[in-house]
Each structure stands twice: as C-alpha cells, then as structure tokens.
Image: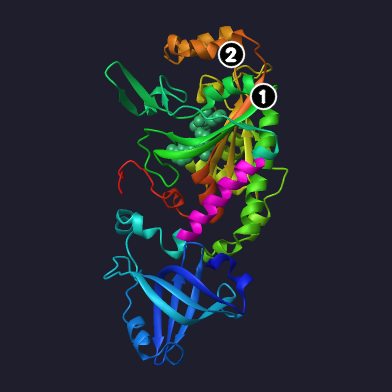
C-alpha cells in the first residue's frame, strides 16, 4: 500500500493505490486517469496493450469519483504535476459512482456549499484543508516547543467573555441556560496562574449577525496566555508564532500553495520584526488619507485593510481606547483612557487575525468594569479570585485559525477554510 504524497519513495516499483477517480481523459488506446487518495493527486496511465481489452473498456466507462484500486509502476516524469506518473497494470472498482453532482464545469458557490460534504474532494478544497491541517500542527508545535501547556477550556459556559450580545444560548437541562463559549480567555487566565504558560485550542462561537468574508459563527481559536507577562511579551509571542506558521506552510505545503496559485513572494516576506503602531498613529494615517474616522472609533473592515496595505507584513496596532475594547483590558498607567491591547492585521486585506493584550489585574477597577459592562458579578466571582490570590501581570491573545488560513491560502472568503462552515444563513450540511 502506497500513498500519493510519498510516491517518490517508490520510483521504479509497482505499488497499489486505493483512492477515487478524480477525472478521466482518453485518447484511443490510452486512458489518463487522475487518481486521488486523500494525500494527493496522480495521473495513472492505462494502455490497452498493458491491461487488455476488457479492463480497458471498463475503465472507459468509469464515472467521476468511482472508488478504484489501481496497481502500477511508478515512473518519474518531469512534466507531471507531482513529478511522477503511474503505469497501470491492474485496476478494480471498490465503489461505484454514477452522476456525481459536482462536475468539472463551473458551479455557483451556494450549489457547492450545499454539497460541501462532496465539494471537499475537489483539488482546491483538498489543498486548503491540508494547509489548514499544517497550520494547526505548526501552531501546536510552536507553543509546545516553547514550553506552553495545552489546557482545554469549556465550551458550555455560564457567562460572557467578549460581550453579551453575541452569545448563543443553549438550554442546560431544566435548571439553567448555558452559553457557547466566545473565547477561552477567562479560563486561560486561571490556567496560567496554575501552569504559567498555557494555551487553549478549540471551537468558539459568535452569534454575530455579520455577513462578511471574515466572519463565521463557529470558528477555531488558539489562545495562549502567560503569567508574569506584559503587552509587549504578547506581541512578541504573536509575531514569532505567525512567522513560524507561515514558514512551515511554505516549507511543507508548496504543492498545495501552487494548486491555489498562491503568490509565494508575499508570504516569504513574513519575517520578524512586524511593524508596531499605536491606535493614535493608525487614526492619523487613516485621516491623512481622507478616511472618515473620528478619534475614538473602532476600525471597520476597510480601515483595517487600508492600514494593512501600508506594510508588507502583519502590523500590530496597540493601545486602543479602552472604550472600544472588552472589560478585561488593562488601562495604560500613563494614559488610562487607552488600553494595553493589540490587534494584529494581516496583509492583503485579511483583517484582524490576532486580538489580545495585557489583562486588567486591579481588583477594584475590574469590579467597576464588570458593572459598567452590565455583566453579572456573581458569574465572575471565580474570575475575581485570580485577582485575590497570587495576582500577577499577565497577557495573552487569541488567533483565529480560519482568517489565518484564508490569508495564507489567498482566499476570497473564510468559508472555504473549514470543512463545514457555519454562517448566519448556513447550518448545513
Ligand atoms: O479579537 P477577539 O474577539 O479576541 C478574543 O476573543 C480574546 N478574548 C482572545 C484572547 O485574548 N484570548 O478574537 C480573536 C481572533 C480575531 O483576531 C480573529 O482572528 C478571530 O479570533 N475571530 C473570528 N474569526 C472568524 N469569525 C469570527 N466571527 C471571528 N471573531 C473573531
Ligand atoms: Mg478583536
């Protein structure tokens, strides 16, 4: 048994591939069968002379996506997309297909999303999902190698983290209402006081009615949190994490990036240090270019795109006004109206990929903020304990996997970066 991604190891030998017929082209006495096995795509060349009349005839009638097992000899061919082809000696059908609904012709995106369970077999979607896998793997490797401990945070939670208006509610038996988590952060803070440097990595949920190319209602977020750490420490960590992930994608997913026709140069430019600008500087840049923004406003998507376009690598915008941010942001001691917060904006219009900062560690102020934000204090008692017992400065951030993958892959929309996207008007399949 061989896999297409490691076919080079079998050059000159006969192998068996178990997969599916991606497409077929025939010319007289030869069939060119593109076979996929989940690890890649390869052209299998079947000649009538090699397999005999009967099998040749059968192969000529195979429908797209028929499950087939092919045997053949691996031959290097510089012109082949993966550098190798298979000269078929045997083939059998493992599972028939007739009238596969997704044909090589153009389909509308709704048609494809309705058939997402099949669409993921296509070459582009395969490439994206493999890059997503590599991105997640690289994130975990990076944090594990830096001495972070993975500590999972709950998905059913009793209260809000990012703001009450964007929570999905779930009946919790007959005695309570649970909320699907928007962020593991508050629990990460507790975990950081127990384990020093931690991260959570899981699905998070936002009941936002946003219908943009950057928003999902269910997305995956990695959230590192560090005890004894400042805003700058968090920015440094995000910078080296992003740099490592992009480098890994370039190094190990060249084939997939090529399939996506992703321009590599702009990814190769992703090196530390990233530019770092304050919110004040960002507002000035926007105003100088005639954008209608008032000091104190939060940035809209087009503002973020404009800011990011000024740089060739991600830009860290820090010190946002406290009023634009969540209750847990620590104010800058020098300018208390500003928060020790940071957003990292990806180049090429992919928007905010990281949000985080230094956490508010003053118990009295934290109590005030919870009240000001209309949050129920009882639900936060456990969180307030962190400020009562062994309180230290701490910082962290959240990085959305889908936006990161969309940027690395160069995609129009985040909906293609996750196997089954959940959006305002899409809950199926
Ligand atoms: O900026 P956000 O809301 O930050 C937090 O949740 C913090 N509590 C994280 C922390 O400090 N531990 O979200 C963080 C990131 C964003 O930068 C973005 O990449 C992604 O999560 N994100 C989304 N991705 C897809 N769809 C959405 N609706 C997203 N909302 C946020
Ligand atoms: Mg944010």
Residue 293 in the image: state x and y as whole percent.
51, 34
Q: Does the magenta stretch include residue 229?
A: no
Q: Is residue 90 left or right of residue 108?
A: right
Spot occupied by residue 252 in the image (x, y as percentages of width and height): 63, 58
Residue under the point 43% across and 24% down: 163
The image shows residue 73 at horizontal and vertical percentages of 55, 80
Counting from the top left corner in percent of width and height, residue 324 is at: 51, 25
Q: How crowded is mark 1: few (under 14 residues within 10 Å), some or many (20 or more)?
A: some
Say which element carries label 1: loop
- The picture quadrant where one finds residue 99 is bottom left
**Residue at figure coordinates x 41%, y 92% from the top left:** 29
Q: In this view, does 216 lie to the left or right of 289?
A: left
For mark 2, does the 10 Å Cα neighbourhood hold few (<14), some (14 to 19), or many (20 or more) residues? some
Please give the range of residues in magenta. 126-142
Dot 2 falls on a residue whose secondary structure is helix
Say how the picture is coloured: rainbow
Q: Is residue 294 visible?
A: no
Q: Image quadrant of residue 33? A: bottom left
Work out whether residue 100 or residue 374 is closer to the camera in this orientation and state it: 100
Residue at the spot x=33%, y=41% of the render? 424
Q: Is residue 141 visible?
A: yes
Q: Which residue is the site of mark 1?
A: 196
Quarter of the image for residue 280 reads: top right
Q: Which residue is drawn at 66% across and 31% down?
A: 234
Q: Which of 400 and 131 is in front in this view?
A: 131
Q: Earlier in the sequence, mark 2 or mark 1?
A: 1
Q: Name the residue under label 2.
A: 386
Q: Which is more toward the observer, 40 or 328?
A: 40
């Amino acid at each position: 048994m061989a896999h297409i991604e490691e076919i080079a190891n079998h050059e000159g030998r006969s192998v068996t591939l178990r997969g599916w017929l991606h497409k077929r082209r025939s010319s007289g006495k030869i069939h060119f069968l593109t076979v996929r096995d989940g690890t890649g795509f390869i052209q299998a060349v079947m000649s009538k002379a090699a397999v005999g009349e009967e099998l040749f005839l059968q192969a000529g009638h195979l429908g797209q996506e028929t499950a087939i097992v092919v045997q053949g000899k691996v031959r290097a061919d510089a012109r082949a997309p993966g550098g190798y082809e298979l000269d078929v000696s045997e083939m059998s059908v493992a599972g028939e297909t007739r009238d596969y609904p997704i044909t090589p012709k153009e389909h509308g995106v709704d048609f494809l999303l309705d058939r997402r369970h099949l669409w993921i077999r296509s070459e582009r979607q395969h490439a994206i999902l493999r890059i997503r896998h590599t991105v997640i793997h690289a994130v975990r490797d990076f944090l594990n190698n830096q001495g972070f401990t993975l500590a999972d945070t709950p998905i059913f939670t009793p209260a809000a983290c990012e703001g009450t208006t964007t929570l999905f509610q779930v009946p919790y038996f007959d005695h309570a209402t649970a909320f699907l988590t928007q962020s593991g952060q508050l629990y990460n803070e507790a975990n950081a006081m127990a384990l020093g440097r931690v991260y959570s990595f899981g699905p998070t949920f936002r009941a936002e009615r946003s219908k943009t190319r950057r928003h999902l209602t269910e997305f995956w977020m990695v959230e590192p949190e560090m005890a004894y750490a400042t805003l700058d420490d968090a920015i440094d960590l995000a910078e080296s994490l992003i740099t490592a992930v992009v480098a890994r994608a370039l190094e190990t997913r060249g084939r997939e990036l090529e399939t996506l026709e992703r321009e590599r140069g702009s990814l190769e430019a992703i090196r530390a240090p990233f530019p770092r600008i304050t919110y004040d500087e960002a507002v000035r840049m926007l105003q100088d270019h005639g954008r209608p923004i008032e000091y104190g406003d939060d940035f809209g998507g087009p503002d973020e795109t404009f800011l990011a376009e000024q740089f060739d690598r991600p830009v860290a915008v820090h010190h946002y006004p406290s009023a634009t941010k969540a209750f847990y942001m620590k104010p800058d001691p020098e300018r208390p109206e500003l928060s020790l917060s940071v957003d990292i904006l990806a180049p090429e219009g992919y928007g905010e990929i990281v949000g985080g900062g230094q956490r508010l560690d003053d118990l009295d102020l934290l109590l005030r903020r919870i009240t000001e934000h209309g949050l129920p204090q009882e639900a936060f008692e456990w969180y307030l304990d962190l400020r009562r017992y062994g309180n230290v400065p701490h910082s962290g951030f959240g990085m959305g996997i889908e936006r990161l993958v969309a940027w690395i892959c160069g995609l129009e929309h985040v909906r293609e970066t996750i196997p089954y996207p959940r959006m305002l008007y899409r809950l199926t399949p």
